[in-house]
Image: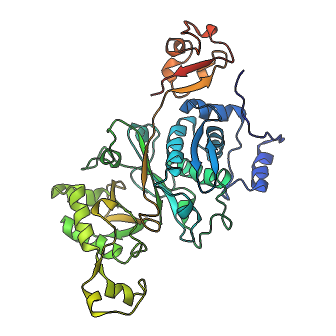
Amino acid sequence: MAVELQSKRYEVKDMAEAIEFYFAKGWTDGLPVVPPTENSIWAMLESAGLEPGAEIAFIENRQVSVTAEKVAINTVMAGCKPEYMPVVTAAVEALGDARFGYHGPATSTGGSAIFMVVNGPIARELNINSGDNLFGPGWRANAALGRAIRLIMRNVIGTLPGLLDRSSLGHGGKYSYCIAENEAESPWPPLHVERGFRSEQNAVTIFAALAPHQYANQLSATPEGVLTTACAHMRISAGLRGQPQYVLVFAGEHQAVMAQAGWSKDDIRQFCFEHTKTSQAEMKRMNVMPGAVRPEDETAMHTLVETPQDFLIVAAGGRAGVQSAYIPGWGGKRSSQSVTMRSAGRRGWRPCRGGRFDGYTGVRSYHRGQGAAHCLCAQARIATQSACRPGRKYEVQLG
């Protein structure tokens, strides 16, 4: 028996009515969404090789199972292309990871957003921006991928502003907060390689993050000079008391300064770790630590992050300009930390739809008759598309 979509269907007379219907239902982020259809939902599912009922994540504190069908629906609504689905799926898997700790950053008054960094060949294939106007508008993939995650949080997990999202201020990243790393021009190993993946693999890192904080240094030609400016900004930033992780984003000119001096990511981390310490006395005077100042507080130092490795370094931004940025994490590392998940085509079962391989957007080389050579019927290998009948299952290895 062929698998059917389980979500409720609604009839509308035209696109304009559909858009307004979604507003009326409270299913948007305040901007119009793309109304999903059965075909567009199946295209998403097929691009990732997923059955509609497959569980992508389970959000423990909400007791919510996030299924592939619901992910696909909201990914369509966000304006994504089908080929974006594996990236969204990986990010959703990361949301359910215990290390991320969904309940805290999603519910807190602190106002964090889901910052996403995409690594690997897929970032270039999808044209995810890693250069000029890095955190700004203009790239469909960046805008739609980040938006899809927020819509899933809202419509599937129930993280609604004023209800289960209690953010006091929030920030623009709660619409979309997605970039790629500029691996081609970076002087360092990419983020996902540092985290155990191969360079040719695709991966998504998510991070409960506050807004990006930009700083500028056009006077220094040394890493120490540039980083002294960065550390001065970070040292009393929002994460001071809680010791969350921090993302350090270095744009082109500052990358060049580091590269010319032969500085590695570890060199940068160690310098920043040592130069973002604050005395407990100063923290008490700033009213970020309780209690009266004692003589010993003058020499008792508090580190911004727990370890140097809690600085995540990303090469991205325009080639020209003397600006870089740091991104404080939410809360503390013990409450939520960054998670990296592989985003890759994988072996997935889908109910056969009568040899309709042309919709399998993740495997273009298998389309129009070539799919049969890579198609395994649940009962036996088949030789032609015509032998694959509705109701059976086939298995395809995605790229």
**Residue occupying the point 62% across, 31% down:** 51
Q: Residue furthest left?
A: 261
Up/down of 278 relative to 319, above or below? below
- Left or right of 209 on screen, residue 71: right
**Residue occupying the point 66% across, 50% down:** 156
Report x, y in % for residue 164: 65, 63
Report x, y in % for residue 360: 57, 25
> Observer-nearest residue: 312 or 253?
312
- Left or right of 323 on screen, residue 351: right
**Residue occupying the point 44% across, 28% down:** 399
Q: Is residue 59 visible?
A: yes
**Residue occupying the point 75% across, 51% down:** 22
**How many numbered discs sit on the rendered protein?**
0
Up/down of 303 relative to 200, above or below? below
Report x, y in % for residue 250: 32, 59
> Observer-nearest residue: 324 or 232?
232
Would you identify the image quadrant in which residue 12 lies?
A: top right
> Observer-nearest residue: 4 or 180?
4
Up/down of 197 relative to 106, above or below? above
Task: Locate the N terminus and report the quarter of the image it occupies.
Answer: top right
Q: Is residue 218 visible?
A: no
How did the renderer colour the structure?
rainbow
Would you identify the image quadrant in which residue 106 lies?
A: bottom right
- Left or right of 157 on screen, residue 6: right
Report x, y in % for residue 61: 60, 57
